[in-house]
Image (cartoon, rainbow, N blue to C red):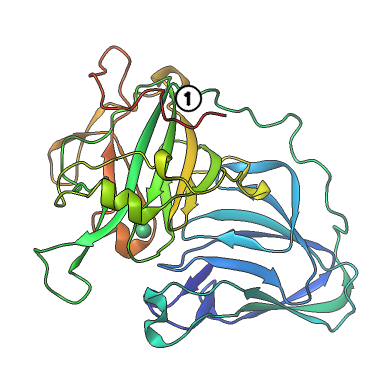
Amino acid sequence: MVKRQWQCGDVMVVNGKAWPYLDVDRGVYRFRLISSSQLNDYRLALSNGEPFWVIGSDGGLLDAPVMVGELDIAPAERYDILIDFSRTEPGTAIDLVNTMQISIAGQANGAMAIRDVMRFVVGESQAPVRTVPHTLRRSATAVPGTPQSVRTATLSVNANTENPTFLGVLGMSLNNMRFDQSDFDMPVQGTTEQWDFVNADATFQVHSMHVHLVQFKVLGRQDFDKVRYLAENPPPLLGTRWTPSADEYTTNSPEPPAPYESGWKDTVRCPPNQITRILVRWPTADELGFDPDAEFTGPDGAAAQGYVWHCHLTDHEDNEMMQRLRVVSAEGAAPSSVTHGAGGHHH
Ligand SMILES: [Cu+2]
């Protein structure tokens, strides 16, 4: 667990300890990482320049270990990694470091980057596991299929005229909507959709988008011209749905996801000035063994339905960067506002 204290802190905390060290034997170790940082994303590497292996992501094991020199991890993303200390000289100290500059908001305390995460100190003994496996699954992960529709979702930080306090003037929204609006997305059970997360945020913040109920595939990312996009599609006041496609404003070719992002994910890094595309298959009640659209009683005692999708930066999700979502049955589906076909990005 990697965490920084407060929004703009400058102390790296791992499992509750500031800059801890761990004694390791000479062998291969599995670490289960979750970034519980509130704001920053990190690029993790080993100080000795040695590679390590990613073997799992949010939704389980990858098909095979992916050797990396660096691993990007945003708040709430999970990765399982293997580090091989088997050939390391006893007594060697190896640091897990972050090579990513911290976010602009995180630099308010003057820290540009927080390099040190934790330290491994290699001992004399041999650990029981001394090799990295070649495969992790018997069969390759299934792909959800071709999307029947494309939804554009916009990630924005915009002026909140109702809250004049410091930082409160910034409203954070998805699709320019408030959380309690009723015109949220209602995908149909059994359908496959492409969602294009358009990060048009003025603050150059990486958002970490999390969809409840499902595991999805990351299709990739593409740069777009945010200035022209915003000029030609000016967002209305907060509270009016605003989801223009950014496909006409792209400035390079689509980039595939990092190889370690090829497994099942429920949380994805959405860098600024990029479209991050995912492929989601909405499960049916039969597949789940329960009705995902069943009514339940909300904390306020009122009847509610559905799930949420949100940015996992905690002050963003707490500031309305969260939307409701209902996964409706095919029979109960209302005509939707989904953009079909044209302009979409198909693989
Ligand atoms: Cu965010």
Relative depth, front residue between 19 and 290: 19
Q: Position of residue 90 (x, y in %)?
A: 88, 80
Q: Position of residue 25 (x, y in %)?
A: 82, 71
The quadrant the C terminus occupies is top right
Relative depth, front residue between 240 and 142: 240
SS under mark 1: loop
For residue 211, which quarter of the picture?
Answer: top left
Q: Position of residue 7 (x, y in %)?
A: 37, 75
Identify the residue at horizontal 51%, vertical 37% (top origin).
Answer: 216
The quadrant the N terminus occupies is bottom right
Relative depth, front residue between 241 and 50: 241
Identify the residue at horizontal 88%, vertical 67% (top origin).
Answer: 86
The answer to whether residue 132 of the structure is visible from this angle is: yes
Q: Position of residue 193 (x, y in %)?
A: 43, 28
> Residue beneath label 1, please?
147
Figure check: 228 above or below 324: below
Relative depth, front residue between 202 and 9: 202
Figure check: 103 above or below 316: below
Figure check: 135 above or below 315: above
Identify the residue at horizontal 49%, vertical 38% (top origin).
Answer: 278
Identify the residue at horizontal 63%, vertical 42% (top origin).
Answer: 262
The amino acid sitting under disc 1 is Pro
